[in-house]
Image: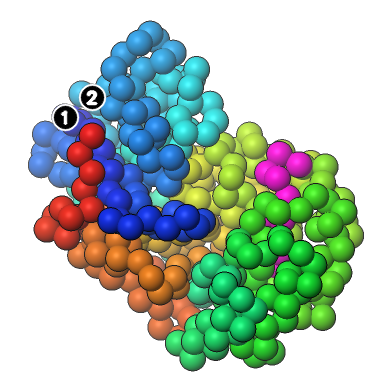
Amino acid sequence: MKITQVETLYLRQPEVKFQCDSGQDALIVRVHTDAGIIGIGEVDSAPLAAKAAIDGPFSHTTACGLGQLILGEDPFETEKLWHKMYRGNIYGGRRGVGFHAISGIDMALWDIKGKALGMPVWKLLGGGFCSKIRCYASSLWGATPQATYELAGRYRDQGFTAVKFGWDPMGRDEATDIALVREARRGLGEANDLMIDAGLVWDAKTAIQRARAFEPYHPFWLEEPLRPDDYEGYAKLSAATDIRIAAGEEESSRATFVELMDRGRVDLIQVDLTRCGGFTEAIKIAALAWDRGLPVANHGFTTYVNVAAALHFLASIPNALICEFVAEEETNLRESITKQKLRAADGWLAIPDAPGLGVDLDETAIEPFLVRT
């Protein structure tokens, strides 16, 4: 079997709001083969920049479009192809967008392997640690503390036993920050877990003050309160509070995850399959976390392609803790573009058992979202 084409699809909702919701557009990758098997993947990044990293032509031996690098190759050779892509775009792909772009291709290659062999990706990865995993409803904060209280109650009534709220308006002032957390806890009730995603809003001293102020509301974790490169600040924060400190979605290789773990001393690692280098790199990151006694959760605020990939990944590692599951109520792209619609049952998600990722694009449904560039 040989790779014959690497195709990128930029999908975008007609209305994109000015908010931190990366599910409003998406970059989908399709890898075609001469056997007629097509694998799909996703990149959660600056979509058109990642598209250019994949679609671009050969410039020189360390700056080449990723699609060009794998044409004619055997899709089963995922480790070799990962290194070929990394080396072939090392000028622009060691970190960030260029590295994110590798993720979508790698994901699609594993989808091809699973489809060709009639096996789910988690089985190819040697997994099988679970057949279902607890998930949390992931949402932006309500516009006000009262709106957050109402959202928390709705998610609780939907059967979720854990809920995360994040980003704006947290970080405006101390009173608002505390009120948001207080009302989220009130709406969710005492028996369920509350996660707080601060959204990179504080310095270390402020984050320590907020963590102490939040302690009466028993957060399950405090996520990304600092700039991602402030590893020393993360270490100070982790040492100053008993609340778990979670981070990792901004990291784009195992090298930077090591910095986060060893210098930042965080308590929980969050791995996004669409940014970290795909399955091939994610498994290595999880092993590094396991060696340090750290649990792993996924990050994913985009489509069901990402969620499905995360489920395969989490089922393949011994230190998986919980799965992020977007519960945002106002979005059409996420719910429209795949034939399969993933649903949580009493706060749990089933691990897919169909070949490959177990999700397929709905060709008719994607047409209204497709941006031709």
- Magenta-drawn stretch, dominant element (helix, strand or loop): loop
Q: Which of 359 and 372 is in front in this view?
A: 372
Q: Position of residue 200 (x, y in %)?
A: 67, 52
Q: What is the number of callouts on the image? A: 2
The quadrant the C terminus occupies is top left
| Whether label 1 touches label 2, CB < 8 Å | yes
Which element type, helix, strand or loop, lies under badge 1?
A: strand
Q: Can residue 152 be seen in this view?
A: no
* Location of residue 137 with respect to 274 vertically, above or below: below
Residue numbers of the magenta segment = 221-230
**Pointer 2: what residue?**
71
Q: Is residue 68 left or right of residue 257?
A: left
What residue occupies the far top of the structure in this picture? 60
Per the rendering, the mark at residue 144 is none
Q: Residue at x 35, y 76 (%)?
A: 343
Per the rendering, the mark at residue 4 is 1
* Location of residue 306 with respect to 7 vertically, above or below: below
